[in-house]
Amino acid sequence: MEMSVKLGAGTLEDQPPGDGEAASGAFASGLDAWLAKVEAMGELQRITAEVDPDLEAATLTYLVGVQKSPMLLFENIKGHPGHRALYNIIGCNLSRFCLMIGADPVEHPLDAVRILEQKLGRKLAPVEIPAERALSSENVVVGDAIDIRIFPAQRMWPLDGGRYLGTCDAVVTRDPETGRVNVGTYRMMIKGPREVGVYTSPGKDGGLDRDKWWKLGKPMPIAAAYGIDPLLFLVAATSLPKTECEYDYYGGIRGAPIEVFQGDVTGLPLPAHAEIILEGFLYPEETFAEGPFGEFTGYYGRPSGATPYMRVEKLRYRTHPTLTCALMADNASNEAGLFWAALRSAGVWTDLKKMGVPGIQGVWSVPEAAGWGVTVVSVKQMYAGHAAQVMALAAQCTAGAYYGKYVIVVDDDIDPTDVGQVLWAMATRSRPSQSIDILRETWSTYLDPSQNPPEIRPWGSKALINACMEYKYIKTFSKRTKLSRAAYENVVRRWQEYGFTGRAPAISVFEEDPFPERME
Ligand SMILES: Cc1cc2nc3c(=O)[nH]c(=O)nc-3n(C[C@H](O)[C@H](O)[C@H](O)COP(=O)(O)O)c2cc1C
């Protein structure tokens, strides 16, 4: 259904709807439901003060982006009345990560990894609904009437090359040879009212599809969705098998298929609950100067360079849309830190299982290390060479090979998600002269700032650190101090009586050897 065209920020009513109205209306979106749930959890902060999309919203997000930080809904964006921007959607919050993957809340990150691992093993194809029922069909704009600058595109870092409409986005393309549909998250910098950049790093699926279309001498049909629910962002920002469609994984994780409708400009299946959708084409060899962009590494990536852009033919958006935004940053403020960490952890754990490596207790990629840089594997050592086998395979299995720089193997009494425990194991169990192996010329990324000159960047190296007790001497290795279970349980029981509030720290390692029950 082509609805009446409303163009320009000024044509929207001044105030966005309350969430109750939006969530219960005929056009209730995935994002509305998400907002309502996060608000009910007490983790949504509405910011009604006027905020500038130029640096201010992102700066605020960076500052609050420590662990257990709220999701930020900017409801009053300078120059964009009636529009909203959403930041810190998951951040480093396990509670919202569980909500995203449809799991009950868990206390420990490894429980979330286990659930994700199981859910990634399922797939469900999308179902198609009529275009008129799509949320974004509320407002349809075509041709020269389009001005994508009505949306509050963000500049997140001072040296970013421009305003980014697409960060937390889902870009849809099709392989012209096989027909496989791909959904990827690629940054999208605004070029003009109907033009927006699509940067794909070498080897990414959307870029491979583009090259095939261009080789046929044809422009590539392309669509981009914003205002998407976080699960769609998760699958779009994840390297899934190149021959498969991310929509199927969305359905598998959610346990219900995603609803799509067919875009009449491109023929592509488009997410029916996205709030903003652009359709158009990428024309052969048409590029503009795009970037740089503050990356997930906490550094600017590629300097400004020639990048293809989409010519937008059709814009659909719901009235009062919310632009989803993902801040890429160092440390815990990185929107992708926790979810990339969880995905890599689940992938490496699955690969180790598939290769038949026994004794793995847990795998954790540290979110604060850009989600990819440091992976810790906890293993119950069972035979000579077991720890060395685990670290070599974890470093080079399919899910672990790209970029990661450090693989640390620890014993089963160490919680791999507890950085303090991991450092303690390194300090007391590894012997630097014998415990560290180096792999050279490994698969890396242009985004690694440590590799210079930049031309050598796809090549990296990895350090494998064995922080396990030396297996040769495991029977005589100094015994670590462990709490008595009975004494611990007694203290936990009396915690409040001692005058402490909250709960006592959880401990799972106790002395198992016989010891004198009571020393008089
Ligand atoms: C906020 C954000 C921005 C991203 N920007 C880009 C980008 O501009 N280009 C790119 O190739 N990958 C980018 N990525 C990483 C891709 O989303 C990721 O590699 C994904 O696997 C790409 O999908 P594909 O495997 O289907 O190609 C970004 C990820 C996030 C979370």
Image (spheres, rainbow, N blue to C red):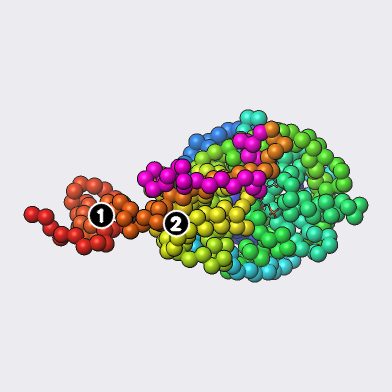
What residue do we see at 66% from left, 33% from top? 452
Q: Separation of disc 1 and disc 2 at Cα?
A: 20 Å
Instruction: Please give the range of residues in magenta.
Output: 426-452
Residue 83 visible in this rendered orientation of the protein: no
- Sequence order check: which comes first, mark 1 or mark 2? 2
Furthest-left residue in this view = 520
Rendered location of residue 238, percent (x, y): 63, 54
**What is the three-letter code of the residue carrying label 1?**
Leu
Look at the picture and state if 9 lies above or below 204: above
Q: Position of residue 441 (x, y in %)?
A: 65, 45
Observer-nearest residue: 166 or 108? 108
- Residue at which label 1 appears: 483
Helix, strand or loop for disc 2: strand
Amino acid type, callout 2: Ser
Residue 25 position in % (x across, y down): 60, 60
Residue 461 visible: yes
- Give the position of the N terminus as an image quadrant: bottom right
Residue at (87, 43) in percent of width and height: 285
| The magenta stretch spans residue 152 | no
Q: Residue furthest top?
A: 158
Residue at (78%, 59%) from the top-left corner?
A: 174
Q: Is residue 245 above or below residue 46?
A: below
Q: Is 241 or 229 nearer to us in this picture?
A: 241
Q: Residues within 10 Å of mark 1 (few under 14, many from 20)?
A: some
**Which quadrant of the view contains residue 264?**
bottom right
Q: Is residue 475 above or below residue 440?
A: below
Is 443 inside the magenta-drawn segment? yes
Residue to which mark 2 is pinned? 378
